[in-house]
Amino acid sequence: MYGQVRAVIDKAPIAMIKVSVYRDRTLLDKTYTNDEGRYSVEVPKGAVVTVRFDTHHSLTNAEDWHPSVVANVIADDESPLDRLLLKSGHGVDPESAVDALSGYLFAAEWEDGAYARTAESRLSRLKQTGEVLQEIQRKLQEYFTKLSDTASNT
């Protein structure tokens, strides 16, 4: 599986985005995008997978981009899986906002306190227009704040 990750606003390639591929609850493979935003991961052809695009808390871009997740992808070596990510703090269309929230919801299942700190910060800068999306965003912020606080106290 391969593709390119770029910015929603100007379509510029994004380097150092972590691309993780899961089947069921198992991480199959992960990699990072190169300077051109390109990635390639090894996945059994025909497998139905979930692909997550996100920053990593230890990198300099940890708070720059909102996550994205694509579920029920059939792994294929012939068709690229390209993705557009939303930059933190930028205005956005509702589709990109929902995509970012979905990425955070997925991350809530997998991540620890170190991730929670950057997620909390990025979520605070996500601009939502609808009340329902604002409520989901608020609940995710509360969850990641609590996770971050718990990690800090241990």
Image (cartoon, helix red, strand yellow):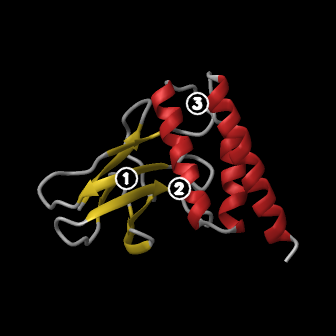
Residue at the location (73% across, 58% down)? 117
Kindly give the residue lying farthest to the right in the view shown. Answer: 153
Residue 88 location (% of width, % of height): 60, 39
- The amino acid type found where label 3 is placed reads His
Count residues near mark 1 (Cα–Cα under 10 Å), then give few for <14, some for 14-19, many for 20+. few
Count residues near mark 3 (Cα–Cα under 10 Å), then give few for <14, some for 14-19, many for 20+. few
Q: Nearer the viewer, residue 17 or 36?
A: 17
In primary-sequence order, the first of circles 1 and 2 is: 1
Kindly give the residue lying farthest to the left in the view shown. Answer: 78
Cα–Cα gap, marks 1 and 2: 10 Å
Asked which secondary structure carries label 1, the reply is: strand
Q: Nearer the viewer, residue 86 or 59?
A: 86
Residue 42 visible, this orientation: yes
Cα–Cα gap, marks 2 and 3: 22 Å
Asked which secondary structure carries label 3, the reply is: loop
Asked which secondary structure carries label 2, the reply is: helix
Which residue is labeled 2 in the image? 106
**Residue 52 lies in what quarter of the image?**
bottom left
- Answer above or below: position of 54 versus 152: above
67 sits left or right of 152 in the view: left
